[in-house]
Image (cartoon, grey):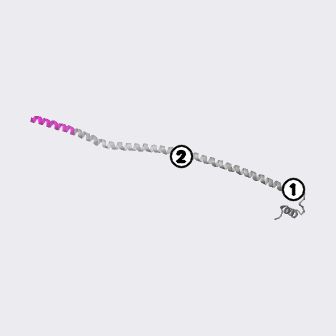
Amino acid sequence: MSDPVDELIKEIAVKHNIAVSRDDPIMVLHTINERLMRDSAKAQQDMLDTFKEELESIAFRWGADAKEKAERILNAALSASRETMAKAMQDSAKATADAVKAEVDAALRRVIAPVEDAKRIARLNIAAACLAFAAAAIALFASL
């Protein structure tokens, strides 16, 4: 593997037709420039690492915030659903009770007339029995 300085000297000689030695002042500038580039790259890498950490932290916070908001929305929807279901159950129970009451009232109305007729017949039977008893009593006293 060749030395980067030797490669640079060859490149200058080929491009510019100038012979430069290792102790030439221009090589000092090259070394300084190389050092500045390395330091700059390291500083940029450090800044990128810091930026990456900050982005990860922000992404984590956003994820936690999104999760918290989603849980709140889900809990609110669940509460609203429970309330809606409870109201629907109450309405359904009331409607069922009203329907049962209406059916019972209708059945009672159908039964009331025959019961009234049975009462009337029972009263007439009692009256007839009393008349028969009175006639039997009169017949018994008349025969005595």
Going from N to C along the chain, the mark reached first, 1 or 2, is 1
Figure check: 23 above or below 61: below
Element carrying mark 1: helix
Count of marks overlaid on the render: 2
Asked whether the beta carbons under mark 1 and mark 2 sit within 8 Å of each other, the answer is no
Q: Quadrant of the C terminus?
A: top left
Residue 135 magenta-drawn? yes
Three-letter code for the amino acid on which mark 1 is drawn: Leu
Residue name at image x 84 percent, y 55 percent:
33
Quadrant in the rendering for residue 122: top left
Query: Where residue 129 sits: x, y (%)?
Result: 19, 38
Q: Nearer the viewer, residue 106 or 79?
A: 79
Residue 2 magenta-drawn? no
Magenta-highlighted residues: 125-144
Residue name at image x 73 percent, y 52 percent:
49
Query: Where residue 110 sits: x, y (%)?
Result: 32, 43
Mark 2 is surrounded, within 10 Å at the Cα level, by few (under 14), some (14 to 19) or many (20 or more) other residues, namely few
Figure check: 22 above or below 133: below
Residue 112 placement, left or right of 19:
left
Q: Which residue is mark 1?
A: 29
Residue name at image x 63 percent, y 49 percent:
63
Quadrant in the rendering for residue 35: bottom right
Three-letter code for the amino acid on which mark 2 is drawn: Leu
Q: Nearer the viewer, residue 122 or 110?
A: 122
Q: Quadrant of the N terminus?
A: bottom right
Q: Which residue is mark 2?
A: 78
Quadrant in the rendering for residue 138: top left
